[in-house]
Amino acid sequence: MKLIIGNKNYSSWSLRAWLVMRVNGIAFEEERIPLDLPDSKASILKHSPAGKVPVLIDGDMSIWDTMAIAEYLAEKFPLLRIWPQEPKARAYARSVSAEMHSGFAALRSAMPMNCRGSYPGKGRSPACVADITRITALWEQCRERCGQENAFLFGEFSAADAFYAPVTSRFITYGVPLTAISERYVRAVSALPAMREWVAAAEAENESIAADEPYR
């Protein structure tokens, strides 16, 4: 399989799909297409009619959209437990992931993912603060309901953690104050070897996307 991704410093959706595959030990070839260049869209369109990353190529199939990729991998590799195994926990994990997938526009706008950056205190509009409050409440609910035995939202690492991994990166970049439970969760995600690998690669990139650098 091949995973088409964007810049590691900026592409939060690429990180989500990549992390699901890397943490679960799924073998894949990585192809990085730098974004915001004159030929970026055309290069991505060769792989997906949506013209966005990530895209998973499996044989003659192209699967785009991170949620679709996670579900495809969960069906293809059922023994890997990409989603929690217990039905209620699995339903809850899909719910919180879907909320991330479709929501939190203020956070995305005010605090773009930027693994290289450090902008403590920036981006805290009232709408963004409301998003942060909702996200940390979700994390605490997940931990209380299903994740107490291990470090992640539902105990063991799952796709839900991949969906929120870019948010943990944002909270570090923008120095967001957190409760003890949320702080421990951010540290757990940051300590993942796969997350460290991604961040190191992001820090080594030299591209700059102006739209994702509002505070530079």
Image: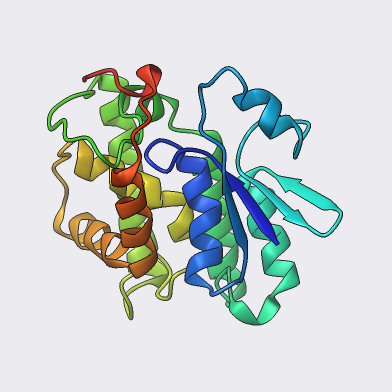
Q: Quadrant of residue 75?
A: bottom right
Q: Quadrant of residue 21?
A: bottom right
Q: Position of residue 83 (x, y in %)?
A: 58, 68
Name the residue at 51% across, 22% down: 36
Residue 96 visible here: no
| The residue positioned farthest toward the right in the image shown | 60
| Left or right placement of residue 67 versus residue 184 in this view | right
| Left or right placement of residue 62 versus residue 184 in this view | right
Q: Is residue 34 above or below residue 41?
A: below
Quadrant including the C terminus:
top left
| Left or right placement of residue 135 versus residue 176 in this view | right
148 or 65: nearer the eye?
A: 65
Q: Is residue 25 above or below residue 106?
A: below
188 or 12: nearer the eye?
A: 12
Residue 164 visible here: yes
Q: Position of residue 122 (x, y in %)?
A: 18, 24
82 or 50: nearer the eye?
A: 50
Q: Position of residue 72 (x, y in %)?
A: 73, 60
Name the residue at 21% across, 39% down: 173
| Left or right placement of residue 105 versus residue 196 in this view | right
State the count of labels.
0
Colour theme: rainbow
Name the residue at 83% across, 59% down: 59
Q: Position of residue 109 (x, y in %)?
A: 38, 22
Quadrant including the N terminus:
bottom right
Name the residue at 53% across, 69% down: 89
